[in-house]
Image: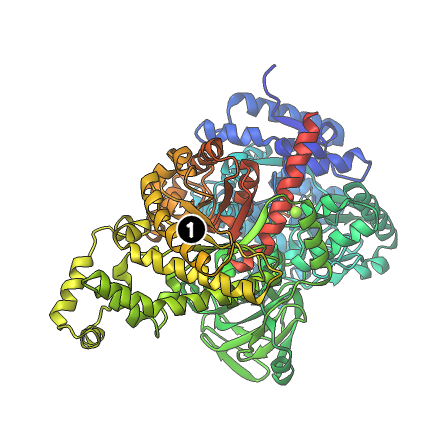
Amino acid sequence: MSKKYCYLFTEGNAGMRELLGGKGANLAEMTNIGLPVPQGFTITTEACTQYYEDDQKINDGIMAEIMEYIEKMEQITGKKFGDLENPLLVSVRSGARASMPGMMDTILNLGLNETVVEVLARKSGNPRWAYDCYRRFIQMYSDVVMEVGKKYFEQLIDRMKAQKGVTLDVDLTAEDLKTLAGQFKDEYQSKIGQAFPSDPKEQLMGAIKAVFRSWDNPRANVYRRDNDIPYSWGTAVNVQSMAFGNMGEDCGTGVAFTRNPATGEKKLFGEFLTNAQGEDVVAGVRTPMPISQMAEKFPEAFAQFQKVCAILEDHYRDMQDMEFTVENGKLYMLQTRNGKRTPASALKIACDLVDEGQISEEKAVSMIEPRSLDTLLHPQFDGKVLKATPVIGSALAASPGAACGKIVFTAEDAKAWAERGEKVVLVRLETSPEDIEGMKAAQGILTVRGGMTSHAAVVARGMGKCCVSGCAAIKMDEEGKCFELSGKTFREGDWLSLDGSTGKIYDGAIPTVDAVIGGEFGRVMGWCDKYRRLQVRTNADTPYDAAQARTFGAQGIGLCRTEHMFFNEDRIPAIREMICSETVEQREKALAKLEPMQRGDFEGIYEAMEGCPVTIRFLDPPLHEFLPTDEADIALLAKDLGKTVADIKNIIASLHEFNPMMGHRGCRLAVTYPEIAAMQTRAVIKAALNVQARHPDWNMVPEIMIPLVGEVKELRYVKGVVVKTADEIIAAAGSSMKYLVGTMIEIPRAALTADEIAKEADFFSFGTNDLTQMTFGFSRDDAGKFLGAYYDKKIYENDPFAKLDQTGVGRLVDMACKLGRSTNSTLHLGICGEHGGDPASVEFCHRTGLDYVSCSPFRVPIARLAAAQAAIKCNNEAAAQK
Ligand code: ADP
Ligand code: MG
Ligand code: MG
């Protein structure tokens, strides 16, 4: 049988998300459980993929199936497309598998034309409504299908309002709206060079294509990249008969959450507008009323709505985000989904649902987006300074967190300023999907218009970014890049602080304080630790970072980079002396100066880690990185070392490399200068012995990691130096302390010969930054120049330095694990690249059978959660197999 591309809402269910998209699957599910849903059908995500395979065309087969389903829909609703008695009007809505708010475009009231609108006006006795629908349709269709741009239409509306001396859309009369519709069509004709389509079927096909096309718009591509949504998924299209919230005062439309998405409180939360349609509530043009007032306006519909909320929560066992419309007092459900929420409310809701007996701990752990934890770990305003700082304004606490930065007025500026390292706060009249990248770059967002469900609020909560919205007291001059608030003028570049948890706005910069893991956060982390198999370590080079990571639950250090210690101002002379030495004796003398400093550093780190394992990597970067570049420094160094400036310049020239990244670095340094490895070994072992003596109850087992090995013999050689040095010191101390020597796997040749290398190594740590670099053959520092073009051409969907390339680099990792364990069954395996804190990569590490991941301190809780989710997911998969 050939593929089925269309499903009536009565044919689908919530389990068909991949095929029907989230919106379509849930419309079907709500239909199944008997909720009032305007009926329609869903065109599958496979039709979208097929559309792209067919060179952006809807093929004849799919076209015919759509027409067949339109007829079915006509039978179900008793209305007909383009009919002069009982015309069918539909919405055309996109819906991908994962919800992508504001990413795709929706068209309402499709099916209207000059004659149909007359019929509606006459039959309903409500010409205002008919023309309101008509002008909205032309506006949305033009914007979405032909990409004409909203602003031309908004200008026409503003002009009409000015002429009529009114401020709100609802004050425009039927005649006004009819005139507007005419103007809109003229605008369309003049921009497109064709008349506005009057045939409903032609309109429908145009709209469907537009939804398919919107899957590939730049905003959608950015959102997908940020949220790990593959391009190959495609979007479904929902064709649904209209429910009208704009027929008069006994109509309206709203958005609501079954629990508070900002705090998690178990209480209906939402907003409502009478005599309105579609996105009026979220667009922030009119300020909506809180959902509680709906009880007074529409007691019956409200009572029914409360029942629906309870049914939906019980059914989905999660907080629901719903869209609904009331048409002449009757409730229609238009959408439900698991609601986006702030990280703090996600934790509260997960704990509450467990306590309410709705879900298991495993389910609670799986419900939390690992990356969202990030904001909870970042600083909050310093309470004392906050109290002492005057509040200059207050608006809706749309998304919590503290933000402090310089004011910018456009998304482009936000991006540009942030790129050059400035902290910015984005201040806008209201935000739109085009602003996403700017919102991402900003510390926080402040808008003049819009409610708790405005675009800015929803997107900011999704990003875990601070947002204060709807500050009507601001007198905004977007073009002039300034605004007035509390009698003061604020210009671009002025400092502003926002508190997204209280909605307060402060003049100037307020310092911030660190976060702690407690309460619900601590409880969920406890569950994570119960269910995960992977250990989580951290990458830390200082006692400060190490201590930070410990408070976030790190179980050890997976990567301590020793070179960072050499860059210190008081140490650089000694390291320079070492580099400029001409004999082994000179070099050893310089190294002797460095040894106590290194030993002290290591002791500090061991103390901070309280006896947990610490992997110390030996010197890695090319030596020239330590040498001075400017004349004055060179002269100073010459003087210090009793050499001439020319001598020093000669040494610098001799260290020059054409490709330092692939040059004299890593274990190659220890091969040429074994005394460096010997000194570092002494520092590590002596530090461990000292700390062991101070803490007899700790079991110190230092781990020494030799970087950049590609050949077993070079590891064997360096290891020889380490073992000889270490054994002597340990014996001399009369101790029986154990230590481990391992290597980083970061050169493809090491992965390919891992069985050989494992014979000499106690552990492997995958250095996936270098491994990615060397496998792809391009550097992390230069990839930015061309990755953009690779994204555009869909060659890569992600930055392989941020998200592990499982196909290529991952294969090397997997191979190295298997080869390594085949010759060394006790080989300990970990990863210490940036990928160690990326949730998708953590899952890969779990599946590959690594023992631990290591990531930066602030990612430790994210990795703990991701590791638990991976374990739970794999268990569920295994259970499903049986
Ligand atoms: P988004 O994913 O951006 O929310 P939607 O497809 O949900 O887009 O629709 C945009 C707006 O139009 C929403 O407010 C929705 O409730 C409204 N809407 C969609 N379909 C209908 C319909 N059949 N009748 C009335 N309103 C609708
Ligand atoms: Mg939308
Ligand atoms: Mg919606």
Q: Residue at x 26, y 67 (%)?
A: 576
Q: Residue at x 37, y 61 (%)?
A: 563
Q: Residue at x 30, y 58 (%)?
A: 675
Q: Is residue 722 above or below residue 468?
A: above
In the foreground, 110 or 373:
373
Label 1 lies in ligand 1 vicinity (Cβ under 8 Å): no
In the picture, measured across the screen, residue 679 lies left or right of residue 299, that is left
Percent coordinates x, y for residue 426 in the rendering: 51, 67
- Secondary element under disc 1, as helix, strand or loop, is strand
In the foreground, 648 or 243:
648
Reading the image, the residue beneath label 1 is 705
Asked if one can make out residue 690 in the rendered structure from this viewpoint, the answer is yes
Residue at the limit of the structure toward the top, as seen here: 1
Percent coordinates x, y for residue 787 in the rendering: 37, 46
> For mark 1, does the 10 Å Cα neighbourhood hold few (<14), some (14 to 19), or many (20 or more) residues?
many
Percent coordinates x, y for residue 700 in the rendering: 54, 57
**Number of marks:** 1
Q: Amino acid at mark 1?
A: Met
Tell me the quadrant of the picture where the C terminus can be found.
top right
In the foreground, 110 or 667:
667
Asked if one can make out residue 794 in the rendered structure from this viewpoint, the answer is no
Toward which corner of the image does residue 44 lie, by quadrant? top right
